[in-house]
Amino acid sequence: MKSINKELYKRIAEKIKFVIKEKNLTQDEIANKLNISPQQFQAYINKSDKNKIPIDYLIEIANFLNINPEYFYKSDQNVISSISCLPETQANDLNLDKSKYQTVPVYSFVGAGKFINLTEIEPIDTLLVPKEFIKKKLAVVKVIGPSMEPYIKDGSYVGIDLNYRELVSGYIYCVNLDYEGALIKYVIKDRDGITLKSENPKFHDIFIKKEEIADEDHFVIGRVVWVWQNL
């Protein structure tokens, strides 16, 4: 998991450099705003794997540059892959090389707390998935609702890697809320808790305090690694 964290902080550093350039500012100006030396600031953005910039500094930078702090954490759209799948019911009508695909069950979100144990849920469909996108522990779920539109549309299928249980800011996860069930959201972590964000601005953020997550294994279902949808 360390490589995931390095990837995150590298992305943050690159975004800081990009937005400073876009605003026609210098790194020294930002360092002065943070009341730190230019050398320390350069260490944060040039050696991000060893010098992780504190979230307080990111918030100050965002306020100074008049941008939303989540910009630094939010994943770019290519973090999850867009793949070509096929419902098994349609495969017989096409000249398809099935040796390149694997049949997997598709599940739907059905009520609070019900998604955690997939063996207790009847699949709603089956999907032919290219074998290169099959993980050791993969769950395919049909998305219901527009909260992640236009990135992930209502009715899309998403592949969830159940081995990715460690939450890293900026990635899309499937998480479970006892009072609402399974949700697919961007995750932003800070010292006080976790914020679940939608792509659709009509949906409000959901903030969960650390103490409210008694069992993280129950809370985190897995990370979204690919999506199949009609464009």
Image: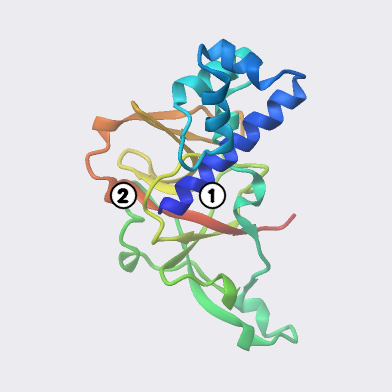
Near-viewer residue (33 or 15):
33
Outermost residue, front side = 39
Disc 1 secondary structure class: loop
* Colouring of the image: rainbow
Q: Residue tagged by mark 2? A: 113
Q: Is residue 171 visible?
A: no
Near-viewer residue (62 or 109):
62
Q: Is residue 89 above or below residue 220?
A: below
Inter-mark Cα distance, 1 to 2: 16 Å
Q: Is residue 138 visible?
A: yes
Return the x and y of residue 162 as percentages of the image width and height.
40, 61
User: Amino acid type of disc 2?
Assistant: Gly
Return the x and y of residue 94 as percentages of the image width and height.
74, 83
Return the x and y of residue 65 as percentages of the image width and height.
65, 16
Q: In which quarter of the image is the C terminus?
A: bottom right
User: Amino acid type of disc 1?
Assistant: Ile
Q: In this view, does 195 lie above or below 35?
A: below
Label number found at residue 6? none
Return the x and y of residue 87 as percentages of the image width and height.
62, 72
x 71%, y 58%: residue: 230
x 63%, y 29%: residue: 16
Q: In this view, does 139 lie above or below 208?
A: below
Label number found at residue 144? 1
x 53%, y 14%: residue: 34
x 53%, y 16%: residue: 60
Near-viewer residue (62 or 105):
62
Q: In which quarter of the image is the N terminus?
A: bottom left
